[in-house]
Image (tube, helix red, strand yellow):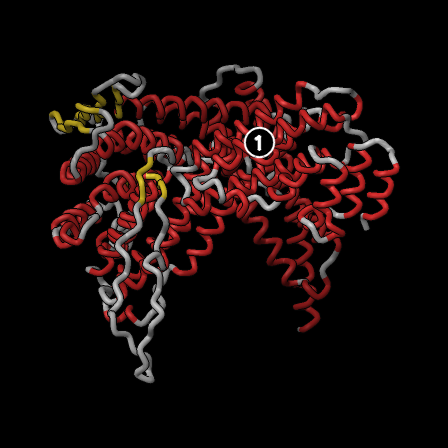
């Protein structure tokens, strides 16, 4: 019995294999015929462009029927393999491989036929104005053509079909874009001088939604939305925010903006009302779904929200941020108006409740208030500091401090020594009006800080400090060229720095008790900035003094004093140079004497004059031979200096105090006009006035240059040690 069953099954298996082999051979023949038919058909349509209107449908049906038979055969083969899994033969594997190869050829043929059907469908859909269906079909074609798993690219016909697809895509995109622009029209956007801009929405054809959805389907909507949002922002929203304009809607289809006064902004109420009118217009005319649950307004939000938010904050809300405590108390209605506008945008679906982009202004108005005040104050300070330094006023010392007559120390002993009335006083001088304005602004800030909350007080105080830091950095840089070359400007800036530094010593103490109690114990001081301002002012003056010294030295370098021994008379350049030096010092007197504090003036011109005198002394004592006539002329010239130089000081005797080399210069004049006997007397064995000013070697050098070699000169030289 078992043997009989085995024979039956074996015979059945052999019959099934034979049957499968015959069936596969038949199908391969049919596929081959179908392949050539499809090839001929595709060549006719996409290469030779021969019109065949019926054959394509027949081929599609034939291909579908063969696919069904292939699926049945595949199932039978799979079943047969499972039956004889343990002893499967090479024949079944060969049959299976042959079937797979046939299946690939059949799929390619079917894909080609599907592409052909898609091409016909796209054209039909466009004619029937079924834009969404046409877009979906184009997407289906794209998926087939650019599928990495298919072998279509290896076919000769692929290039022709791809070109046909691209032509269809381009034509469809051009048509839908053109139709969309006809539905959404702009006027006035290409004319820079246009006063009126309109946005017109034409919905008569009722296909705007289809056009937008079809553009989304072919992944080309984003560029159109960006272009629409940019135009909306530049030509509608921006004028509403920045200009005085009239906004109105005609027949619910035409939105118009008419600019009345460019760059004269409207009030915040008008701006928010007009923007609400605009978004209401967009909501009414574009109230449709683009895809899934995304509406048109939701789709343009990424292209529009950031610019809208920035413009509203910087060009509208910042203008109405309160600048005083009174304005802050009256800001509640403005906050309400801003919130109402945001809630409207949420209601129409432009933003969500998590995207309230103006909330930082409505919730943190106190911080914005003080920030705006501080920014305005710093801007005002910067403007003041850029004013001309030569606009000046005379600063008079304040009333001297009054001390009680009876002052006792801790041991109840009467203090007899009193401070001078000039103690802690800034001397009389000229200061720039800008320096006084800077100090007045600082006092105004501190007065405001005394009436503000703790957090505002701290920011105002440090804003006040920043003003003085700004002065030390900004003024020298802004007026740099004038401070390098103009003596009057240098003196004014020096005085300004000393004036501000003087008041900074006590400015913090003046307001300490007026500030809120929570801040009175803090180290609110300006004392550390005193040294900074003094250093900046002093450095500027010292730098200019060096500049003036270089001018004097430059003049003397052309005086020909170094060539004294080469001629029997003094060169004309010598007198010219000396007179020019004195005139330069007299010019400084004219510019500085009534500007600088008197002690500073005397020290400054004394230092410059000392450089001149020292240079004259060095040039003379370094000469090896000075003829008698030349020495006489030098005495005359130097006496001219002695006569005019003291007049540069307010008191002629001040020259001895502030020109260190003056006594040496006078002694040089004495030597140039003296005899050997007089020189010996003034040397007085190293104890006379000559010995106090000159060294022995210098005196010997002068004697050799002035007198001929005689026994008397030799004896005198030998006695000078």
**Residue 292 visible in the snapshot:** no
Question: Which residue is rendered at x = 86% and y = 43% of the image?
Answer: 715
Residue 179 in sight from this viewpoint = yes
Image point (74%, 57%), residue name: 89
Tell whether 102 sits left or right of 443: right
Which quadrant does the N terminus fall into? bottom right
From the viewer's side, name the closer residue of 454 and 257.
Answer: 454
Residue 139 position, x and y percent, is: 44, 35
x and y percentages locating residue 693 in the rendered image: 68, 47
Left or right: 554 with respect to 499? right
Reply above or below: 275 against 170.
Answer: below
Q: Quadrant of residue 53?
A: top left
Q: Nearer the viewer, residue 488 or 88?
A: 488
- x and y, in percent, of residue 573 in the image: 66, 20
Say few, some or many: other residues with alpha carbon within 10 Å of mark 1 (under 14 / 14 to 19 / 20 or more).
some
Front-most of residues 341 and 697: 697
In the image: residue 118, left or right of residue 615: left
Q: Which residue is mark 1?
A: 641
């Amino acid at each position: 019995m078992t043997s009989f069953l085995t024979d039956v099954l074996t015979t059945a298996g052999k019959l099934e294999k034979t049957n499968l082999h015959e069936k596969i051979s038949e199908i391969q023949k049919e596929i081959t015929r179908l392949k050539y038919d499809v090839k001929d058909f595709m060549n006719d349509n996409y290469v030779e462009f021969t019109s065949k209107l019926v054959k394509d449908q027949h081929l599609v049906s034939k291909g579908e029927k063969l696919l069904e038979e292939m699926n049945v055969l595949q199932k039978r083969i799979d079943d047969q393999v499972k039956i004889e899994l343990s002893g499967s033969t090479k024949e079944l594997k060969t049959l299976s491989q042959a079937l797979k190869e046939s299946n690939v050829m059949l799929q390619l043929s079917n894909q080609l036929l599907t592409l052909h059907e898609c091409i016909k469908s796209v054209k039909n859909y466009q004619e029937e104005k079924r834009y969404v269906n046409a877009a979906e079909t184009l997407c289906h074609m794209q998926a087939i053509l650019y599928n990495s798993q298919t072998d279509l690219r290896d076919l000769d016909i692929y290039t022709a079909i791809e070109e046909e697809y691209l032509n269809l895509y381009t034509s469809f995109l051009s048509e839908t874009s053109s139709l969309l622009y006809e539905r959404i029209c702009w006027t006035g956007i290409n004319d820079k001088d246009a006063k009126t801009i309109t946005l017109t929405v034409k919905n008569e054809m009722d296909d705007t939604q289809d056009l937008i959805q079809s553009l989304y389907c072919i992944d080309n909507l984003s560029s159109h939305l960006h272009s629409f949002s940019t135009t909306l922002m530049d030509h509608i929203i921006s004028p509403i925010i920045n200009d005085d304009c009239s906004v109105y809607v005609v027949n619910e289809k035409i939105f118009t903006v008419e600019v009345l006064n460019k760059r004269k902004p409207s009030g915040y109420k008008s701006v928010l009302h007009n923007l609400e009118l605009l978004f209401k217009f967009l909501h009414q005319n574009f109230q449709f779904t683009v895809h899934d649950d995304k509406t048109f307004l939701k789709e343009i939000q990424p292209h529009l929200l950031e610019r809208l938010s920035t413009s509203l904050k910087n060009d509208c809300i910042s203008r109405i941020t309160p600048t005083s405590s009174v304005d802050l108390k009256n800001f509640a209605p403005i906050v309400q108006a801003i919130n109402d506008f945001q809630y409207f945008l949420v209601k129409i679906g432009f933003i969500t409740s998590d995207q309230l982009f103006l909330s930082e202004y409505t919730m943190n108005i106190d911080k914005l208030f003080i920030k705006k005040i501080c920014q305005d104050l710093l801007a005002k300070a910067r403007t003041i500091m850029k004013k001309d330094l030569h606009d000046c006023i005379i600063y008079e010392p304040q009333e001297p401090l009054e001390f009680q007559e009876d002052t006792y120390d801790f041991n109840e002993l009467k203090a007899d020594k009193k401070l001078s009335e000039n103690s802690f006083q800034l001397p009389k001088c000229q200061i720039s009006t800008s320096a006084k304005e800077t100090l007045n602004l600082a006092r105004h800030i501190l007065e405001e800080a005394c009436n503000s909350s703790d957090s505002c007080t701290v920011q105002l105080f440090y804003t006040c400090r920043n003003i003085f830091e700004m002065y030390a950095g900004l003024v020298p840089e802004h007026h740099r060229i004038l401070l390098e070359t103009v003596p009057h400007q240098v003196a004014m800036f020096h005085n300004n720095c000393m004036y501000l530094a003087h008041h900074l010593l006590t400015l913090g103490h003046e307001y300490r008790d007026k500030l809120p109690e929570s801040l009175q114990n803090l180290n609110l001081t300006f004392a550390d900035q005193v040294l900074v301002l003094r250093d900046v002012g002093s450095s500027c003056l010292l730098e200019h003094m060096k500049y003036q010294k270089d001018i004097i030295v430059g003049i003397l370098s052309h005086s020909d004093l170094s060539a004294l021994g080469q001629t029997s008379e003094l060169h004309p350049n010598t007198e010219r140079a000396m007179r020019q030096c004195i005139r330069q010092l007299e010019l400084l007197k004219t510019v500085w004497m009534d500007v600088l504090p008197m002690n500073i003036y005397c020290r400054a011109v004394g230092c410059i004059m000392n450089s001149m005198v020292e240079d004259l002394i060095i040039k003379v004592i370094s000469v090896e031979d000075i003829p008698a006539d030349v020495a006489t002329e030098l005495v005359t010239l130097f006496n001219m200096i002695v006569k005019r130089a003291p007049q540069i000081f307010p008191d002629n005797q001040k020259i001895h105090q502030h020109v260190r080399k003056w006594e040496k210069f006078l002694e040089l004049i004495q030597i140039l006009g003296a005899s050997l006997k007089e020189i010996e007397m003034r040397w007085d064995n190293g104890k006379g006035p000559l010995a106090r000013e000159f060294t022995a070697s210098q005196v010997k050098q002068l004697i050799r240059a002035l007198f001929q070699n005689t026994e008397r000169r030799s004896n005198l030289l030998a006695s000078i040690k």
